[in-house]
Amino acid sequence: MPSDPRLPPLPLEQWDDDARELLRGRVGMADRYLSGAPDAPPLPNILGVLGHHPDLAAAWLAYNGLLLERGTVEPRARELVILRVAWRTGSRYEWEQHVRIALRAGMSPEQIGAVRIGPDAPIWSPPDALLVRAADELLDAHRVTDDTWRALAAHRDAKELLELLFVVGSYLCLALVFNSVELAPDPNAEPLPAGLAFDSTDLAPLDRADGEASPR
């Protein structure tokens, strides 16, 4: 990743009042950064990038806030799926942000490390392996297979099934944005446990467009 991002995050002091007001209340975790108070934490780079387009940011944060704060899928399952998307797409920013969230949601460091391996990692319970497999199928073929769908539907209701599809699609979209603007990690981010930082040398990318599968 180059040292300079393609689209630098917009510092909060360069936001106008209308932009701040548009984003307030869209997602609870963002509000504390927008207060302008002397003790407000530093603005994350994701919000700085979204600050370039406040109307889009307000709509996106309201939608994403539902997935993160009012979703029907339990946080641990949601984070497992997001981490697999982040890893498969090579999105360092998304991976490292959601490693922290996944740890708070109850995933162990060993489980987070196994996300890099995929659904056949021996650490997974059958429900966990199913979630990782569903994410891979959506990324590879843009459709959950019949067998995986039936297995998911055996223990998840319609709301959860729909939400899982939207989580994968939403975080794929974010990964495309993060990768394309070359979003750097937040400079003041909480350190990650040993071995859980993003390492592109061990990356398993999405299958190439010519149909020849890349190794995982």
Image (cartoon, rainbow, N blue to C red):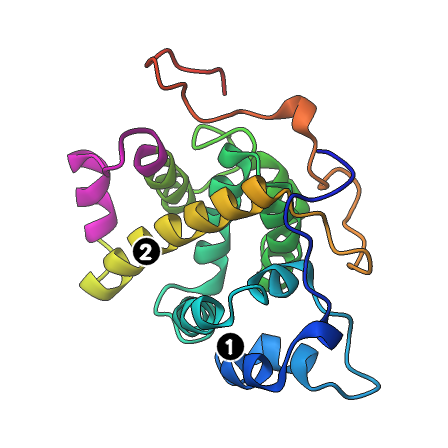
Quadrant in the rendering for residue 62:
bottom left
Question: Does residue 125 sit above or below 100 in this rendering?
Answer: above
Image coords of residue 200 (percent x, y): 66, 28
Image coords of residue 58 (percent x, y): 46, 74
Q: Secondary structure at mark 1?
A: loop
Q: Secondary structure at mark 2?
A: helix
Please give the name of the residue rendered at 57% of the width and 34% of the height, measured from the top-left corner.
90
Question: Does residue 16 sit above or below 178 in this rendering?
Answer: below
Instruction: Tell me if 197 is positioned left or right of 94 in this view.
Output: right
Q: Which sits in the foreground, 56 or 196?
A: 56
What amino acid is found at the position of numbered circle 1 in the picture?
A: Val
Query: Few, some or many C-alpha atoms within 10 Å of disc 1 (few <14, some 14-19, many ≥20)?
Result: some
Q: Which sits in the foreground, 167 or 46?
A: 46
Quadrant in the rendering for residue 131:
top left
What residue is pinned by disc 2?
Answer: 166
Rendered-image quadrant of the N terminus: top right
Image coords of residue 194 (percent x, y): 80, 42
Identify the magenta region: 137-153
| Labels in figure, total | 2
Instruction: Tell me if 43 is positioned left or right of 104 in this view.
Output: right
What residue is pinned by disc 1?
Answer: 27
Mark closer to the chain start, 2 or 1: 1
Image coords of residue 51 (percent x, y): 59, 67
Please give the name of the residue rendered at 44% of the width and 57% of the height, measured from the top-left corner.
78
Please give the name of the residue rendered at 65% of the width and 47% of the height, measured from the top-left corner.
183
